[in-house]
Every structure is written in C-alpha cells, then in structure tokens.
Amino acid sequence: MIADSTAANLLGNIHGGEITKLADSTAGAVAQRHSGGPAVTAAMDEMAFLTPVHVGDILRTFAQVNWAGRSSMEVGVRIEAQPWNSAADGPRHVASGYFVFVAVDEDGQPRPVPDLVPETAQERRRHREAQIRRAHRLARKREIDSGREA
Ligand SMILES: CC(C)(COP(=O)(O)OP(=O)(O)OC[C@H]1O[C@@H](n2cnc3c(N)ncnc32)[C@H](O)[C@@H]1OP(=O)(O)O)[C@@H](O)C(=O)NCCC(=O)NCCS
C-alpha cells in the first residue's frame, strides 16, 4: 500500500514515478530469479498509466520474463490497485510496462542468462511480441546512433 502523501501529486493521485519504481523493483526480482544473480535495468519502454492510483490503494504487482537473449531479458509488469477500505471494488489494472534487464557479473559486465522456453500459448505470444519490441528498440538505437555519427 502507498500511504505516504508525499508520493501523491496535487490531485491526490500517486506519482507515475512511484509506480514505475515499484514496477522496476518487481521486474528486477524476476530478472534476478531467472538469471540466478544480479541484473540491472538497462531500459524500459511502453510504461502506460491506465487509470489513477490514490493514496491508500493496495497495489499488487505481477511480472514475468517474456524473452531472454544472450545477457538481456525483457520483463513485462502489470500493476493492479484496490481501495484499502473496500473489498467490494475488485482490483483494477492501473499500469503496465516492459523492462530490459541485463544480468551482470561481479565486475558489472554482462553475463549469459539461461534460455527461456515458452510453453503455454500465452507465453509464446509474450515471447513473440517481446522479440518485436526488441527489434524495434535495436533498430531505433542504430538509427539514432548512425545519425549522431554522421
Ligand atoms: C546494462 C549494461 C550492463 C549494458 O552494458 P553494455 O556494455 O552496454 O552491454 P552490451 O552492449 O554488451 O549489451 C548487453 C545486452 O544488453 C542489451 N542492451 C543494452 N542496452 C540496451 C538498451 N538500451 N535497450 C535494449 N537492450 C539493451 C544488448 O542488446 C545486449 O543484449 P544480449 O546480450 O541479450 O544480446 C550497462 O549499460 C550498465 O551497467 N548500465 C547501467 C545500469 C544501471 O545502473 N541501471 C539502473 C540501476 S539497476
């Protein structure tokens, strides 16, 4: 639960940055578990805030590794909220995002991660869509970098 009013903006809604931090922490735990050691956030994209979160809402985070490469992983995160004082209001989907984590060794250098073998239809869909996002991330980076070198 976020009960700290300094986490809220003047409308009484929780700052997007607070929600992103929670998502990043959850994704980091999942990346650490998959890779069997430390992993750092390399990038995040498509963080979407779907509906306001209020002070006192109970938040639940869900995350899974969607795709794993040589040393990087894409982790998808979903956050749900529910009022602290009413069980009648079902959880609402308030935010989602995709995080790229890179597994690192003791020198902070990338280290190999285990393969991810999607098994269910949903895992295969997430895996396929993560590959599309990765291709776009890398293409965008290449294009921007080549423009700067010119
Ligand atoms: C993340 C980090 C270790 C990558 O180091 P690097 O020398 O750039 O590594 P490489 O270029 O060899 O890339 C390693 C992997 O990360 C991926 N990667 C790196 N930057 C990326 C980005 N911006 N977007 C998507 N993927 C990225 C690469 O595609 C590669 O994936 P693969 O091994 O699965 O093919 C380094 O940039 C770093 O330490 N960043 C700071 C991390 C940090 O402090 N995070 C906040 C707190 S946790």
Image (cartoon, rainbow, N blue to C red):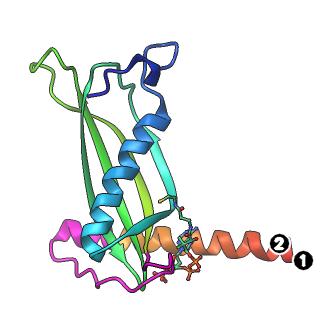
| Residue 37 lies in quadrant | bottom left
Q: Please, what is the dominant secondary structure of the magenta stretch?
A: loop
Furthest-left residue in this view: 88
Magenta residues, as a range? 104-127
Q: Position of residue 28 (x, y in %)?
A: 35, 59
Report the Cα–Cα distance between label 2 and label 1.
5 Å
Q: Position of residue 66 (x, y in %)?
A: 31, 68
Q: Characterize the local packing of mark 1: few (<14), some (14-19) or many (20 or more) Cα atoms within 10 angstroms.
A: few
Q: Is residue 47 magenta?
A: no
Circle 1 — which element? Answer: loop
Which residue is at the front of the view, 114 or 92?
114
What residue is disc 1 on? 150
Residue type at the position of mark 2: Gly
At a point 23% along the width and 69% down the height, the residue shown is 123
Q: Position of residue 50 (x, y in %)?
A: 40, 34
| Residue 1 lies in quadrant | top left
Furthest-front residue in this view: 106
Left or right? Give the position of 59 relative to 105: left
At a point 27% along the width and 23% down the height, the residue shown is 57
At a point 45% along the width and 65% down the height, the residue shown is 40
Q: Position of residue 75 (x, y in %)?
A: 35, 63
Residue 23 in the image: above or below residue 86: below
Determine which of the numbered discs, if any, sits on residue 147 in the image.
2
Residue 118 in the image: above or below residue 45: below
Residue type at the position of mark 1: Ala
Q: Regarding ligand 1, which quadrant of the image does it lie in? A: bottom right
Kindly indicate whether the residue at mark 1 contacts the one at mark 2 (C-beta within 8 angstroms). Answer: yes
Q: Characterize the local packing of mark 2: few (<14), some (14-19) or many (20 or more) Cα atoms within 10 angstroms.
A: few
